[in-house]
Amino acid sequence: MKTAFMMAVLLAALSPATARAQIKRFWLAPVGGFHTYRLGDVNNEIETINAGIAPLHMDDIKSGFGYGVAAGVDLNPAVTLEIAYDRLLGSSKVGDATGSLEYNLPANEFTARGTFRQATEATFAVGFGVAAGLVKTAGEVTLGGAPGTGSLSAHLSGSGPAVEGFASGDWRVSPRFAITPHIGFRYAKISETKVEGQVIHNPDGSNYNLDYSGLATGVRLKLYLN
């Protein structure tokens, strides 16, 4: 009788923890963040342009905001898996009454992500994660003439691997809502860039690349579906 009683107590103690660990919670989240970029070939080109248009000056493209959406599942309090889309923004423009030049270099990043944190029932937890996927440029360079004279545009294309490591937090605001900030480093380099389908090169003959590698920050506003 005593043994049966002890078994009943043990099962009662373990059952809630086991149930919590097995619940899979699905969610959707808008994403917003700030990013830095290398974009060395682009900025070298801008420096050359600046030498020829002084006193006008075109800024380098070193950073930009981003937005996107993610969908995922919390397998348990310690592990989250997700797929995410991020639109990385970056641009620079210069001009006067005689014309203008604009580099608009957004990129689309598609990744699968995993986040691992300490298993806790507290409202806030910290962890780390990794992501891997693909980055594709959606860039355009536009040369504009004087008002009323029209413009010429060159569309850039290309893709490359994207890999990211990050630290993250998870703030469970309510049973249906959580805020998850993260900060990390992204490697995302397009080594072969094309204009209207043709590979373009630097003056030294090397491939013209678009390097979106750099600091990656973001915040997810997670809405749980179950």
Image (tube, grey):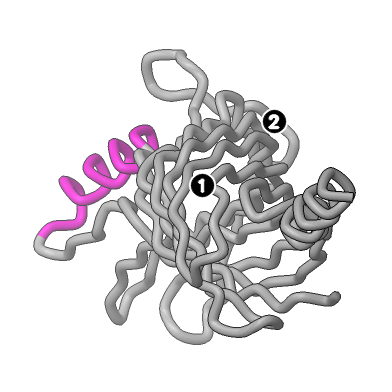
> Do we see residue 143 in this rendering?
no
Q: Amino acid at mark 2?
A: Gln
Quick one: label 2, few (<14), some, or many (20+) residues within 10 Å?
few
Does residue 82 lie above or below 158 as drawn?
Answer: below
Does residue 143 lie above or below 187 as drawn?
Answer: below
Residue 186 position, x and y percent, is 46, 39
Asked which quadrant contains residue 226, the reply is bottom right
Whether the magenta-drawn stretch holds residue 97 is answered as no
Residue at the image position 54 percent from the left and 41 percent from the top: 129
> In front: 134, or 31?
31
The residue that mark 2 highlights is 198
Residue at the image position 77 percent from the left and 69 percent from the top: 27
Does residue 126 lie above or below 176 as drawn?
Answer: above
Callout 2: helix, strand or loop? Answer: strand
Callout 1: helix, strand or loop? Answer: loop
As drawn, the label of residue 118 is 1
> In front: 5, or 213?
5
Q: Amino acid at mark 1?
A: Gln
Nearer the camera: disc 1 or disc 2: 1
Give the magenta-colored segment's residue range. 40-54
Whether the magenta-drawn stretch holds residue 50 is answered as yes
